[in-house]
Amino acid sequence: MRYVIPAIYACVFAVAVYFAVVQSPLPEAVASVPQDARAALSPATGTKVGKRESCRQSVSSKNLRRQDARDQLQLCVAKARVDCLQQAIDQKLRANVRRAFVKSCVAS
């Protein structure tokens, strides 16, 4: 009995690690993201500014009230996500590759 319980825990741990590895995006999914989908350099700082961050900057420059700013930010990010999804569809990406592409496109 003292060998059975640790063996069961080891098997459960191995299965959990296996499923974590299987569900992680593939390395070629990240490599397939084209450079034109990535955000351009910010002219002020010289660093990359993602679409989400550019939405934040554009909303904060409008001096809106709290709820209006939140609504505008959600709308801007949703439009950026749809644009990235359209790019993925045009490239005929599927499943995990598409998911990784859209995620990196919106973030970068």
Image (tube, helix red, strand yellow):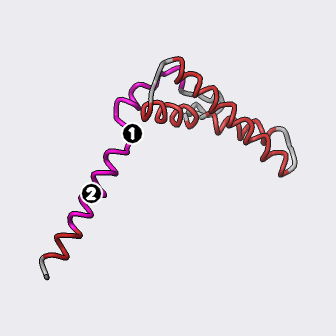
| Percent coordinates x, y for residue 97 in the rendering | 43, 31
Type of amino acid at the residue the image marks with label 2: Val
| Percent coordinates x, y for residue 83 in the rendering | 63, 26
| Percent coordinates x, y for residue 1 in the rendering | 13, 82
Q: Residue at x 85, y 46 (%)?
A: 68
Report whether 16 appears left or right of 48: left
Report whether 54 appears left or right of 87: right
In this view, 43 is above or below 74: above
Secondary structure category for the residue under label 1: loop
Type of amino acid at the residue the image marks with label 1: Pro
Q: Magenta segment, which residues?
A: 10-37
Secondary structure category for the residue under label 2: helix
Q: Which mark is residue 3?
A: none
Residue 16 is one of the magenta-drawn residues: yes
- Cα separation, mark 2 vs mark 1, equals 18 Å
The one of 16 and 46 positioned closer to us in this rendering: 16
Q: Residue at x 26, y 63 (%)?
A: 13
Q: Residue at x 79, y 40 (%)?
A: 72
| Percent coordinates x, y for residue 87 in the rendering | 56, 21
The one of 27 and 58 positioned closer to us in this rendering: 27
Furthest-top residue in view? 90
Q: Residue at x 65, y 31 (%)?
A: 80
> Which mark is first along the chain, 1 or 2?
2
**Residue wearing tag 1:** 25
- The answer to whether mark 2 and mark 1 are in CB contact below 8 A is no
In this view, 67 is above or below 72: below
The one of 8 and 107 positioned closer to us in this rendering: 8
Which callout, 2 or 1, points to the residue nearer the camera?
Answer: 2
**Residue wearing tag 2:** 15
How many residues crowd mark 1 within 10 Å: few (<14), some (14–19), many (20+)?
A: some
In this view, 43 is above or below 75: above
